[in-house]
Amino acid sequence: MGLIQEIDYGTPASTSEKQVTLTVDGFTVTVPEGTSIMRASMEAGIAIPKLCATDMVDAFGSCRLCLVEIDGRNGTPSSCTTPVGPGMVVHTQTGRLKDIRRGVMELYISDHPLDCLTCAANGDCELQTQAGVVGLRDVRYGYEGDNHVFKKNDGAENFKWMAKDESNPYFTYDPSKCIVCSRCVRACEEVQGTFALTIEGRGFESRVSPGMHQLFIDSECVSCGACVQACPTATLSEKSVIKIGQPEHSVVTTCAYCGVGCSFKAEMRGDELVRMVPYKDGKANRGHSCVKGRFAYGYSTHKERILNPMIREKVTDPWREVSWEEALTHTANEFRRIQYQYGRTSIGGITSSRCTNEETYLVQKLIRQGFRNNNVDTCARVCHSPTGYGLGQTFGTSAGTQDFDSIEQTDVVMIIGANPTDAHPVFASRMKKRLRKGAKLIVLDPRRTDIVRSAHIEAQHHLPLKPGTNVAVVTALAHVIVTEGLFDEAFIRERCDWDEFQDWASFVALPENSPEVVGQLANVDPEEIRSAARLFATGGNGAIYYGLGVTEHSQGSTTVIAIANLAMATGNIGRPGVGVNPLRGQNNVQGSCDMGSFPHELPGYRHVSGDGVRDIYESLWGVKLDDEPGLRIPNMLDAAVDGSFKGLYVQGEDILQSDPDTKHVAAGLAAMECVVVHDLFLNETANYAHVFLPGSTFLEKDGTFTNAERRINRVRKVMAPKNGLADWEVTQKLAQAMGLAWNYQHPSEIMDEIAGTTPSFAKISYDYLEKMGSVQWPCNEQAPEGTPIMHISGFVRGKGKFIRTEYVATDERTGPRFPLLLTTGRILSQYNVGAQTRRTDNVMWHSEDRLEIHPHDAENRGLRDGDWVRLTSRSGETTLRALITDKVSPGVVYTTFHHPDTQANVITTDFSDWATNCPEYKVTAVQVGASNGPSEWQRDYDEQARNSRRIATLEAAE
């Protein structure tokens, strides 16, 4: 076991199909046209010295170390900026080149601290390495005169010296060690797309500067880590490396935050994690990262993490630590008692979108085989269940159509109800890169999100629609496409049902669906709607990306169908650069759906009423399965209040904070007799729990996650579980306590069972994933290497289905008492309910939820920025501080839901999607006014939470 070393080819790969052959130091090498000499040499196994070059950014040619000689050409051109040519003869190691390189390196070292033995980069410093490579043995120039190394020169202040910037919680910036290679600046521009760094000054005065000579923490830096990764010296260094030292081995695993599914090298020293480094071979992230995946892993060792099982008789009692055996035996006995007393369907479970596919599969198996019912649900119910329904109805599959690489061939990007720069930042960086290259952008969102206008990017059309009018606006786009004859008739006739299209076309062409009518309804300029529709229909490859701003509505499923209609009508399905792409919120929300976490579906989206499907599992599991769908989460809570549902196993979800109408959730949980929470921390749901089973982090387990592009990625164990058991082992032991004869020895055996029973996973195994790196389902005999792009030659359901999408206004209306509309979302530094990120230094950027309110609405209410305000709806009220901004339209307010002391969901209502019960988080009628302090509910909740989290101390033995 050692560090995984990735080859740095110096410059990016060329995508040309034409091949060029040349000779480098006597070796013949053939590479794509447009490849640099540096990369071609590396392909031949010849490493040319370099400092400013790295294959994550374009060639720059400033360090002058990579010079080469070319037969027939004068001078010594830089190999990073010189493309190969047919028959070219290159020499990388001549006497002349050696002398030049040593002279260049001598100049670098003459203005660089020589504290190599105590430097944090010792052992991982490219400057140190290249000094050895070029044979530098002496430096003829001293530090006398101008330098950036010392604070004082001959007792006088040295104004060229700058103090180390330690303002960022995760890395330091030491200007004295900067060689001005510009790699960090270019990484920020080309990879991340933030443009937060620049080179200030000229010549010897040059240095890297965050923003306008600011501290990193005060600049526009988003702490993605691209600059740290690019830095060849200790100028930018992780604080973890400074504290712990250089890592000695690494393991490739998958990030456990959002649905992008980034691959990382977990670099370790012993069993201590030193740093997470984005893996260049990761097909989802291609070597990039965000602040959460790169740095926010400290929660795994946070002092509030619970490591021992606990039980209590009543939720008002303090917790009592017990052994695993006692906790699991107690849980099994309680569940059996409840079922004996109240019936077989009186208990159920909730799977986790943060746990692995294997762990999720086991939870739904426990419920169906052990509990003998279908009362299983997942957090996808409250986020992307309309995606499953809408795409299933129109295309025949419940997932996105493309891989992330597809964005590189997109000409028009349409973003609906998604904020990728905050919620899916690594993919957003790839999207912004494509936009900077000329792709056009259309955004449908009530807020002016960052991607609408940022560095070198501006949306051609931003439709700031009124919350709740998604269906009307998307149908209005279709109205323009149909009435102006912009639809792709050849595609529709070949791939869809023409009669269904004509029926749909006649519907969208109705006058009530015109931009002029819809524009008034949605507060959007009709001409903007028309122009956006024309651009999408005629601009080339059009791709639609959408998020929870689409699905979390009473017409969420209808909007997904409308989006699918739009893609089919314009022929934007079945090839690179197009498609319908839901951006999943959690790391394994796609996988939790795939694994049968819904009460009406077995793994692979097969309905429980299907005799053939049930036969597969009945013969394997040895029990008769219920053919009736079970209870969804809202139904479980309703039944609990009614007295017929009494026991719940919750793995890795916090429904009290994440689900709508918090008071109703609390009432349902309080009515149950045995609530089992299986998690890392005493979360909000644990306030009403009777059993707490400590969970394990993604660093402590083996398994797989499935990301938003259907990519199945390995999760690899990098350290032993601090609680003693991985989550799959906890579920297995609970199943055994309930009398089931489970005996899995490793998660690979669980995946083998999944593959043996689920057609879309048929070829998946851990061995196959080791060989392929990752694959996208379906992966079976028909698609042995997976399916990056769906519906290439036809839809899974046969013909694509056009469905009418009639706009029905939500029952949640504004009025004199509640004149504003509240919508909710996420912020870059925080994740979901914040249980993980709030226990990291990410709180420096977002320590509280704020209420965004337009200046006009704030002025009418006498509010100033930072004032405490009371946010009231028909469901409840809470208080938080105001953030006055024109990002939101007049009449709309916005907040995040990361902090439990705000509990934004005490405001949201119980209205939900008509097809899936997905809650309507995005439309709540509210009033905002000045506040003198916490609401009564907040005070009561805080007292109850503090009382509920008490842990009894063990008395000393006599």
Image (cartoon, rainbow, N blue to C red):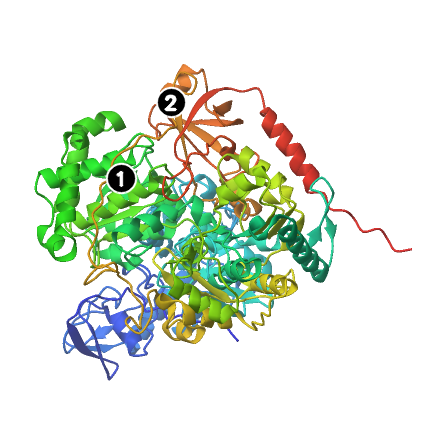
Location of residue 322 by image quarter: bottom right
Judging from the image, what secondary structure is the residue with disc 1 in? strand
Q: Position of residue 714 (x, y in %)?
A: 45, 66
Q: Position of residue 698 (x, y in %)?
A: 53, 60
Judging from the image, what secondary structure is the residue with disc 2 in? loop
**Badge 2 amino acid:** Thr
* Residue beneath the point at 29% across and 76% down: 43
Q: Which-is-in-front pick, marks 1 and 2?
A: 2
Q: Are marks 1 and 2 in contact (CB under 8 Å)?
A: no
> Which of the pair 192/434 is nearer the observer?
434
Mark 1 or mark 2, earlier in chain: 1
**Badge 1 amino acid:** Val
> Which of the pair 579/689 is nearer the observer?
689
Q: Is residue 132 left or right of residue 868?
A: left
Regarding residue 144, the answer to whether it shows in the image is no
Regarding residue 887, the answer to whether it shows in the image is yes
Q: Position of residue 379 (x, y in %)?
A: 47, 48
Against 349, is 79 above or below? below
* Residue beneath the point at 22% across and 77% down: 90
